[in-house]
Image (tube, rainbow, N blue to C red):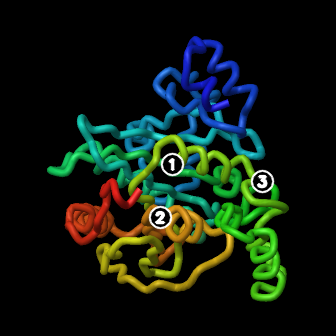
Amino acid sequence: MRDAFGSSVIAGAMLLAAVSFAGAAAAEPRVRHAAPSPKPPCEELLRRLPNVTRKLCEGAGLADTGARSVKGEPLYRVDVPFDKAKLRVLVIGAIHGDELSSASVAMHWLQLARDEPVAQPVHWRFVPLLNPDGVLANPPRRTNANGVDLNRNFPTPNWERDAATYWEKRTRKDPRRWPGPKPLSEPESRFLHDQMLGFKPHLIVAVHAPYGVLDFDGPTVPPSKLGRLYLDQVGIFPGSLGNYGGVHKGIPVVTVELPNALRTPLDAEMRQMWLDLLRWMSEKGAGLGDPNGR
Ligand SMILES: [Zn+2]
């Protein structure tokens, strides 16, 4: 299907195809021509997300990819490209729907990426709200509408054995941490997987809450801190994005655990985290964008 999307199909047909294959794959090369969102997303998001103004939300340019959540909500992404960018960075918020601040921080960083171009050209892709069904649930919930913890649904080796065992033995079948019936069983995790395949990021930054630390998986030297968050590698989980992307695909994954799921850090602190991320990315030691590393 990816090949069909990428080749000679006319844009209109592609949009129809994208809608009819909702949830299976994004119309990867054609986001700029995607149909407008079926409804303005900001009304709902403003009610739900902390520290997100109408200006920030409407200025974000949330682009409908054609992909849908279990309940049919659009899965948005925003590209902030830069001429001749050699580095591609994918930033993800709200993999867990009850970590509302994570979507807000992704939106603030999106604005910073637009407004404060840096010396090192970067092509950013933001997926600020991977789990809209969880975010919009009342009350918000960690899992998607099928009750799956999306951050346990990625195809790490031996997933069938390890994810189930971990869930049963280590979490005692915690319903908030169910890895799902099989890897990539969910439209939201498949959407993110498609972004990884199509966009080929050199770095993934996944924003979570509320543990107040920085975690890292991958082959390079991790950042020691982002703002007030310090590196504390907490462990490896079967099916997690960090495990899949960082350990098995060799794509560095920075996992930001904000200190509070319902409140963002102050704007100045979010900016400092952003600047620390940029500084780390530009350091040679980080080894990002090294063709040998891919
Ligand atoms: Zn989380």
Residue bearing mark 3: 185
Residue 10 at x, y percent in the picture: 58, 11
Q: Residue furthest left?
A: 119
Classify residue 55 by image quadrant. top left
Classify residue 182 by image quadrant. bottom right
Q: Quadrant of ligand 1?
A: bottom right
Which amino acid lies under the numbered mark 1 shown in the image of this protein?
Val
Label 1, label 3: how many angstroms apart (C-alpha)?
Answer: 19 Å
Residue 216 at x, y percent in the picture: 44, 75
Label 1, label 2: how many angstroms apart (C-alpha)?
Answer: 20 Å
Report the side of 261 relative to 292 (left or right): right
Graded by Cα atoms within 10 Å as few (under 14), some (14 to 19) or many (20 or more), the crowding at tag 2 reads some
Q: Is residue 194 visible?
A: yes
Which amino acid lies under the numbered mark 3 shown in the image of this protein?
Ser
SS type, badge 1:
strand
Report the front residue among 214 and 287: 287
Residue shown at the point (72%, 54%) measured from the top left: 184
Residue bearing mark 2: 250
Q: Residue furthest front?
A: 292
SS type, badge 3:
loop
Classify residue 3 by image quadrant. top right
Residue bearing mark 1: 127
